[in-house]
Amino acid sequence: MLQIDDRYYDRQKFEQMVAESADRASLDANARYAVCFTDTAGWLALFFAIRDIGASVFPIHPATPHPAARRLAAAAGCHALYFNSLEAESLSAEIEPASQGQLLQMSSGTTGAPKCIARSWADIDAEVASYAATFRQPEEMTPVIACPTTHSYGLICGILVALKRGRTPVVVDAGNPKYLLRILRDIERPLLYSSPAVLHTLARLMPEGETLHAAMTSGTVLPEPWFARIRARTTHLFQQYGCSETGCIAVNPDVTDAADMGFVLPHHVVTCSNSAVAPSEMIVSGPAGEIATRDLGYFRPDGMLVFVSRLDDTINVSGLNVYPREVEDVVMSMPSVTDAVAFRKTDTLAGERVGLLFSASERLDGPAVRQWCARNLASHQLPMEIVQVDAIPRQANGKISRREVAAQHAAGQFTALVREVA
């Protein structure tokens, strides 16, 4: 039923663990529980115990320290916290019991303060059913979950969809890429669910001639050089797109361009532009009403949903829109450059201009980077300031918060290896 690293749990063993967790935790169907476990098996057993009685659960990343876990649990309106123990820590007796069981999760916070999103178990079940029925290519593949199971990507699309299909999900710690590769080699037709950063690392580590059977990417658009490398080393490359409020929205069964998010799952209705030259915000409609994704995109004639940029990331230079990914792809195509992020800077003349951080395998000359940009970008897209740093600050899931990067840059928090100002 479930494998965690090298340990297999059959249905009888795991159901026994779920029952024991429910008994020892003294669960109440009307309560909201926060759970932070470093032991993946223990966390999943308690998750299913909470879900099975119809209570609400707020998963917290296992690396979260205890004081931070308590703060997160309180912010999510939880009654109690289970922190590496089945002994509950009481948080508040004043919270009104939930009318229905829910999965509680914090939004990514890439464009603002994180907020708690609550989705009912009925909504989760509908997502799982739609995903499994529509996305049929992996039906004979074994899902390998090398991403946090406290996030909906690994928990819902990875584990719950696998169980819906009758497959045995394999949960693997992504911290050791060589160990992950060994696990993948031992599995017939594996489908890897992981972050863009992990996929890129594996593509670089694999010996010449070796490929991944199948991989799913999500969470952020792959930079073009990363995409080219991963696509060349993967037989079946899939991509999915979603947001915290609605779960998975679209799945691409054969990715040939990093911006192609996929075809919309049938339990959603998405409206946006049909024009690549005039993209608009993607709006998702459902039983809960309309959800504004804050993402710019458009539909191709074949129904493919294409991502252009986050609305909040778009840089307006003298009335002309600059989409950060276009700048980043150009910079990352320069030899030796390993990562890059373009962000908004205020400018007294143009209103906004482009700032750029990049990392590279060697020290690069600032004017040379500027000349590379000038040969490949329009004048309004050119960065007004270019800074080489040791590493680009990416989140654990591979995403970049350009708002945070801009704030950190303004506060002088980056130690520049090379700085070039126009």
Image (cartoon, rainbow, N blue to C red):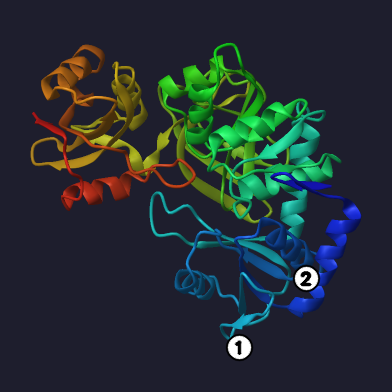
Residue at (48, 62) in percent of width and height: 115
Residue for badge 1: 93
42 to 249, vertically: above or below: below
Q: Looking at the rendering, which quadrant does residue 33 occupy?
A: bottom right
Percent x, y for residue 393? 34, 44
Percent x, y for residue 11? 88, 52
Depth order, front residue of 39/315: 39
Amino acid type assigned to the residue bearing label 2 in the image: Ser
Q: Secondary structure at mark 2?
A: helix
Q: Quadrant of the C terminus?
A: top left
Depth order, front residue of 136/149: 149
Sequence-wise first label, 1 or 2: 2
Residue for badge 2: 21
Residue 261: tell me if it is visible.
yes
Q: Secondary structure at mark 1?
A: loop
Looking at the rendered structure, which numbered label has been put on residue 212?
none
Percent x, y for residue 253? 67, 24
Percent x, y for residue 48? 77, 61
Residue at (60, 45) in percent of width and height: 173
Residue 240: tell me if it is visible.
no
Amino acid type assigned to the residue bearing label 1 in the image: Ala
Q: How many marks?
A: 2
98 to 170, vertically: above or below: below
- Judged left or right of residue 187, residue 367 is left
Residue at (78, 37) in percent of width and height: 132
Distance between mark 1 and mark 2 Cα atoms: 22 Å
Depth order, front residue of 29/272: 29
Graded by Cα atoms within 10 Å as few (under 14), some (14 to 19) or many (20 or more), the crowding at tag 2 reads: many
Task: Pick out the residue farthest to the bottom.
Answer: 93
- Judged left or right of residue 53, residue 224 is left
Graded by Cα atoms within 10 Å as few (under 14), some (14 to 19) or many (20 or more), the crowding at tag 1 reads: few
Disc 1 or disc 2, which is closer to the eye? 2
